[in-house]
Image (spheres, helix red, strand yellow):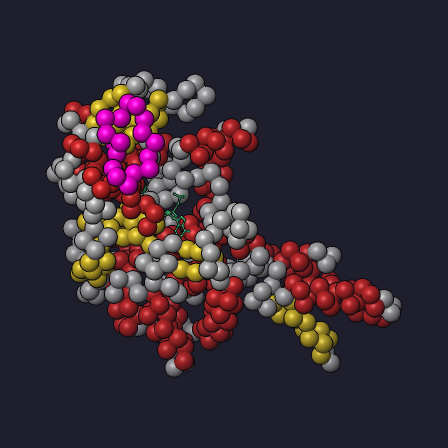
Amino acid sequence: MTEITLYNTRTRRKAPFRPIDPGNVRMYVCGPTVYDRAHIGNARPVVVFDTLFRLLRHVYGDAHVTYVRNFTDVDDKINARAQRDGRGIREITDETIGWYHADMDALGALRPTFEPRATEYIGQMIAMCEVLIARGHAYVAEGHVLFSVSSYPEYGRLARRSLDEMRAGARVEVAPYKRDPMDFVLWKPSDADLPGWESPWGRGRPGWHIECSAMAHDLLGASFDIHGGGIDLAFPHHENELAQSCCAHPEGSFANVWMHNGFLQVEGEKMSKSLGNFFTVHDLLQKGVPGEVIRFVLLSTHYRAPIDWTEAKVEEATRTLRKWRGLTAAAEPSQDVASAVVEALGEDLNTPAAIAELHRLAGAGDAGGLKASAALLGLLTDALGGWAEAPDAGGAVSALIETLISERSAARKAKDFARADALRDGFAAAGVVVKDTAQGATWELAPEFDAAKLEALR
Ligand code: AMP
Ligand code: ZN
């Protein structure tokens, strides 16, 4: 069996991965808060942990891996969005989940085994709060239930910092009802205009961290193998999940291996709406960037390192995948995935090394090996890979290009050079490369193809 080695944020070390039960390898990854489209940074954990999911399935068998990724559908950001837009919360969360599925499907991400919604686990969260109170790890104050960090000497285990260090560095607003500034909210009261559920502490709603602990326990048990998410979640979210889960279920260890992906930035800068470099997965797909290209770019950097999203990488990935798709178009995948690819992924998910192996297979003309091995990274997996679908849903792009090319010939014949030139320049700007041949015009899409610019030529 392939040896998998994983870096564990908790121990700050790589170690051979030994599942609790090889017959049911269990992984939990924190999912999105659903009130808006997923941005390109949000796609990184999805693609990284999907690749790990594929590797685990490859090694332990498809039926022997359970992957849970939640939807946070109760959150103050969702409430604010509902109030701003005058819409119902459920309407917003349902719509956003639909978008999320469509966008992540386009990136070739398999659906997790379970995708629980937080609002379906309120009962389990309340029960967990009650256990924590009964065991002296939580207390009630002004309608809130708070976790008492001083009740758990191991608090700070994941961050590897002492409570004193954390208190000193804390910039938390200290609510008067907190016994310790580091105590965190498990449950809080809701006004009449906010979503709320009846509880022993009045009508209220959960704090953020408790949902993952409740859902992970319900679906994966008191101990499971891998817990993942972006590095921003390590503290306080994961620290708090770990503390409350171990206190409520001391028979278990919660997660054994903690994995965190590094952050994504764009062209060397932090992504932000004010810098104008903020974009969603949907924006990219709309622009005609195939989902497979997005996936390739995200996997071309090791998951723990920060990744810089650049236009140049998108173009490079487009060229590579075009070539590989051409090479493998008629090939049957070979029986076996190249062992060097499995080994690279087994080495703490070293996707850049795995991609280098794919280049080697392509260079050697091993189309079958390339097809089988790329599939383990979720690449070259289906007939489309988003290529036909994204840039040209239903052939609309080809139809428009053909129409505009005929219009250009008609304009030339009618000596309307202004329109003919405008179309020529417009094609160039939209990334449509038109070549006039003796048999008529041919065209192809350049990597920088921009559907909106083409549309504007109508
Ligand atoms: P959120 O919906 O904000 O809770 O985020 C969903 C997931 O995306 C979490 O695992 C975050 O850690 C991750 N994430 C958010 N922004 C970035 C980013 N810029 N780069 C990488 N991961 C991110
Ligand atoms: Zn979580």
Q: Position of residue 440 (x, y in %)?
A: 73, 75
Return the residue nearer the eye: 178 or 147. Answer: 178
Left or right, residue 50 beside residue 451: left
Rendered view: 220 above or below 14: above
| Residue 371 drawn in magenta | no
Q: What residue is drawn where x is 60% and y is 56%?
A: 394
Which residue is more in the foreground, 202 or 433? 202
Write the residue at 26% across / 31% down. Answer: 181
**Residue placed at 30% from the left, 19% from the top?**
142
Residue drawn at (21%, 66%), measured in percent from left and top? 2
Residue 94 visible in image: no
Which residue of the protein is positioned furthest toward the right in this rendering? 414
> Can residue 331 be seen from the camera position used here?
yes
Ligand 2 resides in the quarter of the picture at top left
Does residue 85 appear left or right of residue 235 in this picture?
right
Closer to the camera, 425 or 289? 425
- Looking at the picture, how far across and down is residue 378, in whole percent? 39, 61
**Magenta span covers which residues?**
167-183
Image location of residue 254, percent across then percent down: 19, 43
Tell me the chief SS of the magenta region: loop
Position of the N terminus, as image quadrant, is bottom left
Report the front residue among 27 and 368: 27
| Quarter of image, res 207 | top left
Above or below, 242 against 349 in this view is above
Residue 297 position by quadrant = bottom left
